[in-house]
Amino acid sequence: MPADTLSPPAAHPYDGRPPPRWAVRAAHLIPLVVLPSGLWRVALVAGLPIGAVVAGVPIRPGFGESVYIVALSLVSEGLALLALGLVRPWGEVFPRRLPWLGGRRVPPPFAVTAATAGAVALTLIWGYAMWGALVHGNDLGVPAGGFALLVGCYAPLLLWGPLLLAVTWSYHHRRTPPPPHTFAP
């Protein structure tokens, strides 16, 4: 076998181990659960009839608000795509194109801490938002169909935090050594 087809040895004994299939699927599902809310926001900016009306007048965001709404959608989807790093090689070794970090090992505690904090924050944010929507209902005066579409597009965000937490646990389990066994006499 030619030398150029051999994969380089792992820099650390726990690097390069493949993630479980369920974790790969969950990581790929995360951007998909974020997508409906982003599409709803983009449809709002585009002026599509999504039922976002107050007192019979369609909601039309101004230019600055539109830029913010589109940026929010892009940033949300970008953050969701970062979950793929927990199951892909670039989540173990920083890409070479990154200055100062390129080619270095991603410290597992850094990735696990950041992803866990994000998962907990997302769970709290979207859990609170959905609780508010269910408790307060349609306080905005939006027609029932528009409100149902809004809730239907945002409800998948309830899965973002738990899915990220599960994929993070898998990453941690795969990239760190098991704790030493201690036996009580």
Image (spheres, rainbow, N blue to C red):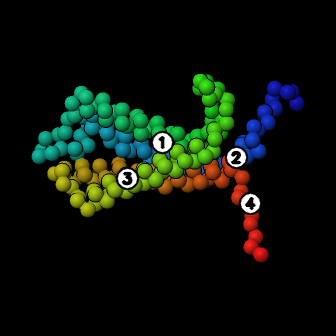
Mark 3 → mark 2, Cα distance in angstroms: 31 Å
Question: What amino acid is at disc 4?
Answer: Pro
Q: Locate residue 76: give its quadrant.
A: top left
User: What residue does disc 1 label?
Assistant: 80
> Which residue appears farthest toward the front when viewing the image?
185
Q: CA distance from mark 2 to mark 1?
A: 21 Å
Contact, mark 3 vs mark 4 (Cβ under 8 Å): no
Where in the figure is residue 70, as x and y percent of width and height? 34, 33
Residue 71 as seen in the image, left or right of residue 185: left
Q: Which amino acid does the dot numbered 3 rest on?
A: Trp
Q: Which mark is residue 126?
A: 3
Say which of marks 3 and 4 sits in front.
4
Q: Amino acid at mark 2?
A: Pro
Mark-to-mark CA distance, 3 and 1: 14 Å
Question: Going by the image, does 32 lie left or right of 177?
Answer: left
- Front residue of this view, candidates 162 and 124: 124
Residue, disc 4: 180
Numbered label attached to residue 18: 2
Residue 150 at x, y percent in the picture? 29, 49
